[in-house]
Structures are given as structure tokens and as C-alpha cells.
Image (spheres, rainbow, N blue to C red):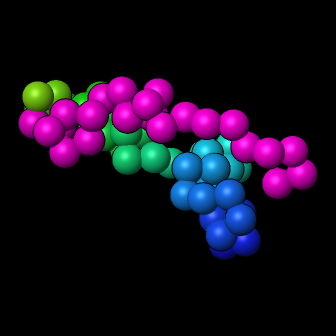
Amino acid sequence: MQLWLSHGPAVARQHWINQGGITRRMHLMCYLTEGRVDPLEGDLICQLDEDDLMKCEVPDGC
């Protein structure tokens, strides 16, 4: 929570991913691989390039 307060949500999100957290796109990709979701429908909920668009650097020491 301290990281979110001091550096904002984008840095906190990237830290979560670096620690093994799973993003919305990662969840969607699992469903797409299993054939449970239509790619066009899934892209309406979560853009398939969302992780690339939201990627940022995490400051050292976090």
C-alpha cells in the first residue's frame, strides 16, 4: 500500500506483476487458450495489449 501511496497505481501494479501477480489480460489469455471466451468479446472487456500499454518502471528498493 505504501508503494501505491508514494508512487501511484501504475508503479504498484507493476510491482504486483513483478512479484508474481496476475493481470486481467493474463486471466483473459488463460480463458482464450481454453476456448472459454471469444477473442473479440474478451477484447471489449480487457484490451489484449493492456499489459503493454500499462507497463512502467518500478523504482529501486521497492
Residue 29 at x, y = what percent? Answer: 34, 33
Q: Is residue 58 left or right of residue 4?
A: right
Q: Is residue 53 magenta?
A: yes
The answer to whether 36 is drawn above or below residue 61 in the figure is: above
Stretch in magenta? 41-62
Q: Is residue 10 left or right of residue 7?
A: left
State left or right for residue 29 relative to residue 35.
right
- Quarter of image, res 30: top left
Whether residue 20 is visible here, answered yes or no, is: no
Q: Residue at x 38, y 34 (%)?
A: 50
Residue under the point 11% across and 28% down: 40
Of 54 and 18, the residue lying toward us? 54
Q: Does the stretch in magenta take in 35?
A: no
Quarter of the picture holding the C terminus: bottom right
Image quarter where the N terminus lies is: bottom right
Relative placement, left or right, of 11 versus 55 is right
